[in-house]
Image (cartoon, grey):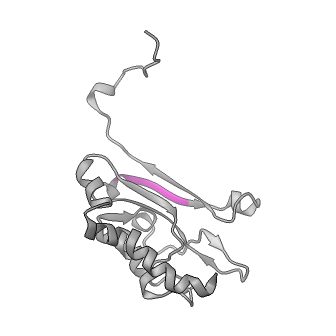
């Protein structure tokens, strides 16, 4: 698998990354335009790290850092890094004991100021339930005037 990773993965990321979608007129820019008043959130185990990550990942190439950078270029902010610009945090740990922040949560840049909390929680990983930390996001969203004081719909007539 390692022998295939290098030739295949750059092509995959070029075709399906936000940067590749930008050129095709797809992805984040269209979502941001379609929902300008709503936060657009992209989250997951991306298996990439940001430039300057501690500890450095010895086998990561420029294309992997470029994939991480493509989210910002597409108008998305790293929600964790927005609140914790200098904190060293890890979401996955290898056999060597080195930790890496492979899991990310991006939010549309105009809505980054609404991020109240974005954190990694290690309990499930430490209990052996998963090999990744749980990541949480808490947003402060404005109330819609018509929703204040209204009971949720029950579906009954």
Q: Which residues are magenta?
A: 114-119
Q: 139 above or below 11? A: above
Q: Nearer the viewer, residue 141 or 49?
A: 49
Q: Nearer the viewer, residue 127 or 10?
A: 10
- Looking at the image, the residue that sits furthest to the top is 157
Picture residue at 50% right of the left edge, 75% below the top: 48
- Residue 3 forms part of the magenta stretch: no
Where is residue 148 drawn, in percent x and y?
A: 33, 26
The quarter of the rendered structure image containing the N terminus is bottom right
Dominant secondary structure of the residues highlighted in magenta in the image: strand
Q: What residue is at 46 percent from the left and 64 percent from the top?
A: 80
Left or right of 120 in this view: 84 = left
Q: Residue at x 45, y 81 (%)?
A: 10
Farthest residue in the bottom direction?
58
x%, y% of residue 25? Answer: 25, 63
Question: In the image shown, does 50 or 44 lie closer to the viewer?
Answer: 44
Q: Quadrant of the C terminus?
A: top left
């Amino acid at each position: 698998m390692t022998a295939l990773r290098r030739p295949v993965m750059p092509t995959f990321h070029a075709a399906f990354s936000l940067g590749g979608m930008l050129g095709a007129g797809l992805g984040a820019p269209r979502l941001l335009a379609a929902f300008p008043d709503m936060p657009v959130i992209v989250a997951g185990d991306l298996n990439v790290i940001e430039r300057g990550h501690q500890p450095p990942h010895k086998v990561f190439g420029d294309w992997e850092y470029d994939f991480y950078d493509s989210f910002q270029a597409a108008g998305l902010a790293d929600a964790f890094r927005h609140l914790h610009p200098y904190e060293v945090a890890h979401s996955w740990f290898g056999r060597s004991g080195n930790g890496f922040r492979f899991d990310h949560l991006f939010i549309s840049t105009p809505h980054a100021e609404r991020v109240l909390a974005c954190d990694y929680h290690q309990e499930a990983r430490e209990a052996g339930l998963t090999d990744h930390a749980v990541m949480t996001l808490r947003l402060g969203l404005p109330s819609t005037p018509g929703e204040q004081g209204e009971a949720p719909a029950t579906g009954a007539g």
